[in-house]
Image (cartoon, rainbow, N blue to C red):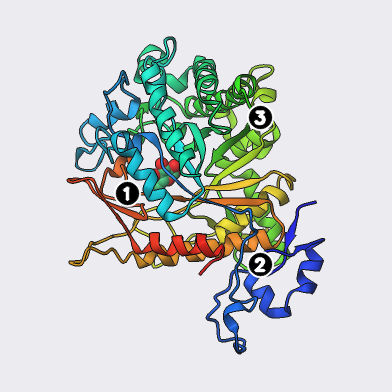
Amino acid sequence: MNKLYGPDGKTVLTSRRAFLSQSAGVAALMAASGMSTSSNLIAQPAGAATSPMNNATFPPDFIWGAATAAYQIEGAASEDGRKPCVWDTFSRLPGTTKNGDTGEVACDHYHRFADDVKLMAELGIKHYRFSIAWPRIIPDGRGAVNEKGVDFYRRLVDELLAHGITPHATLFHWDSPQALEDLYGSWRNRQIATDFADYCTQVVKRLGDRITNWMTINEIFCFTYLGYGVGQRPQHAPGTLVKSRQEVLQTVHHALLAHGLGCQAIRAATPKPAQVALVVNYDAFIPVIETPENIAAARRAFVMEEHNGTVLVPALTGKYNEQAIAKLGADAPKVQAGDMAIIGQPLDVLGFNIYTGSYVKAADNDRGYEVLPLPKEYPQMIMPWLNFIPESLYWGVRMVSEALGKTDLPILITENGCASNDEVTAKGEVFDLSRVMYMRSYLRNAHRAVAEGYPLKGYFHWSLMDNFEWSWGYTRRFGITHVDYATQTRLPKESFRWYQQVIAANRVL
Ligand code: BGC
């Protein structure tokens, strides 16, 4: 059974019911549901700072971290033997990124990683999620290993370990080697799955003495559904036009296969016991009013909607969701014998990237639910897709247990964050208060999930620092550290200071 934590975050309770009865009645229920501590619905007793209402304390072993990705921060695009990835090529095409921005220099982390690790230590994180660039390790995508590329990650990881920071490495965060795109159309070809697994083997053989937390692939959705399109150039690399949606779905299938073979490769190559995860930005559905009918509707949407039904569901269960496949009809992916067993490899951890969600309610239709449209004035951070829906974190975690029955699969929030219009004041400060508001609200929902006994084990903020935001170039800032791209100066924002305190106190402030 999952451990349940009392409202003090330390007492281990024996059941969900015990949690409720040992908590201070309504106040604890409110804290557990992530409601505002400043609510005046209940009179604040003296010493309210330590009352259950204010005390969103996490278990002592809760993981606090921050995340980045290779192409978004490293720069040094043609140094030490690295060859182009699809984002190098795509971002150089006119009209693909804002201002024609590329990741050529980005945050110059390749040369400044030691200072960046100092920044992490100042923040107080004990865990750091980064990604390894395939075209640095195997510049042609397959074949010879570039040892200089491996050395960079060895230096980075040694620096992390020297500062007491545990590395969590993602093996693929969208930077497919351009050579494989030229050779066989990268994700359109099944061959990429074996080439990816070989790359995993080479990395884990060399770095597995230092890294034991591996993540195969980041967000299959973004480089398949958004990287290949029919009729109109897709917004993500490789930006390939294909003739049918079936071809798009086939790229998804190949990515899932790559993940499955990658898991097997990591487990076979690791010199030490290691944890293997898949990172998914699966869709979270929130019952618009928390009634049993709407919760049941959210459960149905969670497994049936196309993205979850074709990525998360097969990865966790070894089967595509039947309703999602039926709806796709002739566009469904073509599956060969044995594929689904490879895809459904048991995972040690599920990585959940959560930014936003959708409200649902029960409906009298063939699916039994309706996804609700948001009104025009609904609060949004400055990305067209980034609606402010903090409950998405809680429901996204809960549904892995409730809709997929994976009650014991540890979940890490591997990304959560937002873009904001950050300005540096004359005194050299950045008061990114909308980010603080966003983080506080989402973390209250993380606390609710933990308090109710769901296996949420940690939180990595996206991102440690401002970086190359894909087709938005440098026009969108997601960091808790401001980066001046002209001078490469790092400046911690107010959200950095806030998160630093949260980590130190191990509770939401
Ligand atoms: C990606 C990041 C990206 C972030 C904000 C996630 O989907 O993994 O690379 O920067 O969202 O858009």
Image: 224 above or below 193? below
**In the rendered image, which quarter is residue 278 located in?**
top right
Percent coordinates x, y for residue 487 in the rendering: 18, 46
Q: Tell me which numbered mark, 1 or 2, is placed earlier along the sequence.
A: 2
Which amino acid, mark 1?
Asp
Along the viewing direction, whichever of 85 and 508 lies nearer the viewer: 508
Query: Disc 2 marks which residue?
Result: 290
Image: 225 above or below 145? below
Query: Disc 3 marks which residue?
Result: 273
At mark 2, the secondary structure is loop
Along the viewing direction, whichever of 174 and 375 lies nearer the viewer: 174
Percent coordinates x, y for residue 140 in the rendering: 38, 14
Q: Residue furthest top?
A: 143
Question: Alpha-carbon neighbours of circle 1 within 10 Å: few (<14), some, or many (≥20)?
Answer: many
Q: Tell me which numbered mark, 3 or 1, is placed earlier along the sequence.
A: 3
Which amino acid, mark 3?
Pro
Query: Disc 1 marks which residue?
Result: 466
- Residue 363 shows in this picture: no
Quote the CA–CA distance across marks 2 and 3.
41 Å
At mark 3, the secondary structure is loop
Which amino acid, mark 2?
Glu
